[in-house]
């Protein structure tokens, strides 16, 4: 039985346990896509908590592909250096730095959720077809040239991500963003080679994977996040997800299985671990490394997902915002104190000044700012 705290070999990259930080938009970048002090503190804190992999939020491959004006970007070489600071901080805290690359397509040009509504000023959005998401702006249907440019933008952003020091590149193929928009017949009504049947609708995803894979050196792993279902009749299905993952397996090191986000009339059946069945279907159908995500909040629950073989890793988002030290607490509550080491600077907070230290994570000196 595999343990939550056992290491995982991700295409030659050693992960210290099976817990990862899911990508989480912070809508806190400068308006030119540059990370801010917020990102440094946020990501480093999450890495200090003991997770093995920290995936930086959806980072736009073009300015038009941003969900909001506050999205991170990697569309220009000037953005490499500030991202290198984020990757170095995550590494210095003992986690593997990853990044999610995305394009929001028809869901671009919005405000941060706490403001709501369209971005001001807004910009023209593009998508596979001129079909809007709910009451959002209707996108311009992408031309062949738009498609070629966007695929190149994914590859160019991946090159920059590698230069910045990220060791895991995840493509955002979920939650109703551009790659997902091509997959689903609800948002892709094209009748050319980029739409129609499963092969046509999945072509953009396949070509994005191929374009990025071609530029990744050894030692950098490739992942992709999919929504395994749209939760809408007539939408993208779990069966199609499994088939696509099986087809992509030779190029992809990790499948991150989420759900929904494509259609405003989705009816999600929420509950603890509600997306785990999707991850399990992909893992069983492909034999590939797979992560589960979504309402994973309890130590026993996470341990069971790994031990039962439903997934190879768990990714967590909201529970880690509430408590970045969840991995250390989970190890303690499962009677495995020390399985997730405590940063030595924080040791007295966990064990008291006069008690002997337990397992400490003594890493390289932190880089100076
Ligand atoms: C603040 C916040 C921002 C998010 N941003 C992203 C994102 O950038 N990319 C993505 O794929 N999912 C994003 N998500 C979804 C999470 O990665 C995760 O799949 C979802 O929250 C379910 O996991 P949880 O129940 O552990 O929170 C975000 C979630 C939250 C709470």
Image (cartoon, grey):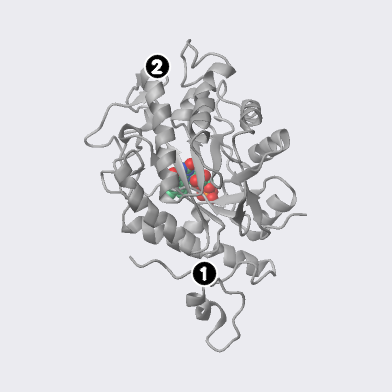
Q: Residue at x 56, y 47 (%)?
A: 219
At which x and y percent is residue 226?
A: 55, 35
Q: Residue at x 42, y 45 (%)?
A: 161
Q: In the image as oriented, which residue stretches furthest toward the left? A: 121
Disc assigned to residue 144: 2
Q: CA distance from mark 2 to mark 1?
A: 48 Å
Q: Residue at x 37, y 59 (%)?
A: 40
Q: Nearer the viewer, residue 143 or 108?
A: 143
Q: In the image as oriented, which residue stretches furthest toward the bottom? A: 354
| Res 289 → quadrant | top right
Residue 191 higher or lower than 1, as above or below: above
For mark 1, give the secondary structure.
loop
Q: Earlier in the sequence, mark 2 or mark 1?
A: 2
Q: Are marks 2 and 1 in contact (CB under 8 Å)?
A: no
At which x and y percent is residue 162?
A: 45, 45
Q: Is residue 198 left or right of residue 264?
A: right
Q: Can you tell me whether the CB of the residue at mark 2 lies under 8 Å from the nearest atom of ligand 1?
A: no
Q: Could you tell me which quadrant the N terminus lies in?
A: bottom right
Residue 309 higher or lower than 85, as above or below: above
Instruction: Tell me the mark number nearer the camera, choosing from 2 and 1.
Output: 1
At which x and y percent is residue 27?
A: 34, 47
| Res 221 → quadrant | top right
At which x and y percent is residue 213?
A: 53, 35
For mark 2, give the secondary structure.
helix
Residue 102 higher or lower than 20, as above or below: above
Residue 84 seen in this snapshot: yes
Q: Nearer the viewer, residue 111 or 15?
A: 15
The residue indicated by pointer 1 is 363
Q: Can you tell me whether the CB of the residue at mark 1 lies under 8 Å from the nearest atom of ligand 1?
A: no
């Amino acid at each position: 039985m595999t343990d939550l705290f056992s290491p995982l070999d991700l295409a030659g990259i050693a992960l210290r346990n099976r817990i990862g930080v899911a990508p989480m938009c912070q809508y806190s970048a400068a308006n030119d896509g540059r990370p801010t002090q917020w990102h440094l503190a946020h990501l480093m804190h999450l890495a200090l908590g003991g997770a093995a992999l920290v995936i930086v939020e959806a980072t736009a491959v073009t300015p038009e592909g941003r969900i909001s004006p506050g999205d991170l970007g990697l569309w220009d070489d000037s953005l490499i250096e500030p991202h290198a600071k984020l990757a170095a901080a995550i590494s210095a805290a003992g986690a593997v730095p990853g990044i999610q690359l995305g394009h929001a397509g028809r869901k671009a040009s919005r405000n941060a959720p706490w403001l709501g509504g369209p971005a001001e000023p807004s910009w023209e959005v593009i998508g596979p077809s001129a079909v809007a998401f709910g009451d959002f702006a209707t996108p311009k249907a992408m031309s062949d040239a738009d498609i070629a440019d966007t695929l190149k933008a994914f590859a160019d952003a991946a090159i920059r991500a590698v230069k910045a020091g990220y060791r895991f590149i995840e493509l955002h193929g979920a939650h109703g963003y551009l790659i997902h928009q091509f997959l689903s017949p609800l948002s892709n009504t094209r009748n050319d080679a980029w739409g129609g049947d499963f092969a046509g609708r999945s072509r953009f995803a396949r070509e994005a994977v191929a374009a990025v894979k071609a530029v990744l050196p050894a030692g950098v792993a490739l992942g992709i996040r999919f929504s395994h279902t749209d939760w809408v009749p007539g939408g993208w299905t779990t069966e199609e997800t499994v088939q696509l993952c099986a087809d992509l397996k030779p190029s992809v090191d990790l499948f991150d299985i989420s759900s929904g986000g494509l259609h405003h009339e989705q009816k999600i059946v929420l509950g603890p671990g509600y997306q785990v069945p999707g991850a399990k279907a992909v893992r069983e159908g492909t034999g590939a490394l797979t992560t589960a995500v979504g309402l994973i909040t309890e130590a026993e629950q996470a341990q069971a997902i790994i031990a039962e073989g439903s997934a190879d890793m768990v990714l967590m988002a909201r529970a880690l915002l509430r408590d970045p030290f969840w991995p250390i607490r989970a190890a303690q509550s499962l009677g495995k104190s020390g399985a997730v080491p405590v940063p030595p600077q924080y040791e007295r907070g966990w064990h008291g000044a006069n008690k002997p230290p337990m397992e400490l994570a003594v890493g390289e000196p932190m880089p100076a700012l």
